[in-house]
Amino acid sequence: MRILTFDWDEKNENHIAKHGVAAFEIEEAILFCRPFYQKSRKGKYIAYAVTEEGRHLFMVFVIKGSGRIRVISARDMSEKEKRYYKKRKGVR
């Protein structure tokens, strides 16, 4: 999956802010931190990634076309999600 740009507006930025996540953290995680992607339901995707600062993020997005995505939600991973991510990435 090749992601080049993000579709941000006040609505989705405010939503992720409620979870304590900033847009720049999502962009960093998806563009530079080798996320693991999983197809979800209704055309949505999940991305699991660890930021440069070590924050484990769980992100939900839809593909808008031409390498552009719209983030629907983002939050810190649960402990179960962290274990799943580490297992999939081969990290101990």
Image: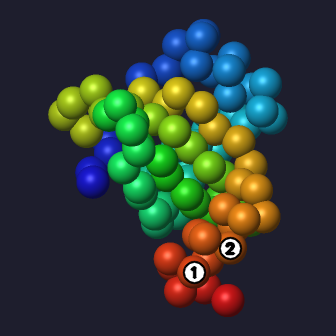
At numbered mark 1, what does the secondary structure look like: helix, strand or loop?
helix
Position of 32 compared to 1: left or right?
A: right
Looking at the picture, does residue 83 appear above or below residue 30?
below
Position of 35 compared to 18: left or right?
A: left
Which residue in the protein does label 1 denote? 87
Residue type (three-letter) at the residue carrying disc 1: Lys
Name the residue rendered at 59%, 70% in the picture: 85
Q: Quadrant of the C terminus?
A: bottom right
Task: Confirm or deny contact between disc 1 and disc 2 (CB under 8 A).
Answer: yes
Percent x, y of residue 33: 52, 63
Position of 90 compared to 65: left or right?
A: right
For the rendered model, the colour scheme is: rainbow
Looking at the picture, does residue 86 appear above or below residue 55?
below
Name the residue rendered at 46%, 63% in the picture: 36
Name the residue rendered at 32%, 45% in the picture: 3
Quadrant of residue 70 within the rendered picture: top left
Percent x, y of residue 47: 49, 52
Residue type (three-letter) at the residue carrying disc 2: Arg
In front: 56, or 88? 88
For this orientation, the residue located farthest to the front is 41
- Pointer 2: residues within 10 angstroms few (<14), some, or many (20+)? some
Q: Quadrant of the N terminus?
A: bottom left
Quadrant of residue 73 within the rendered picture: top right
Percent x, y of residue 14: 69, 17
Name the residue rendered at 72%, 65% in the picture: 80
Quadrant of residue 84 within the rendered picture: bottom right
Which residue in the protein does label 2 denote? 83
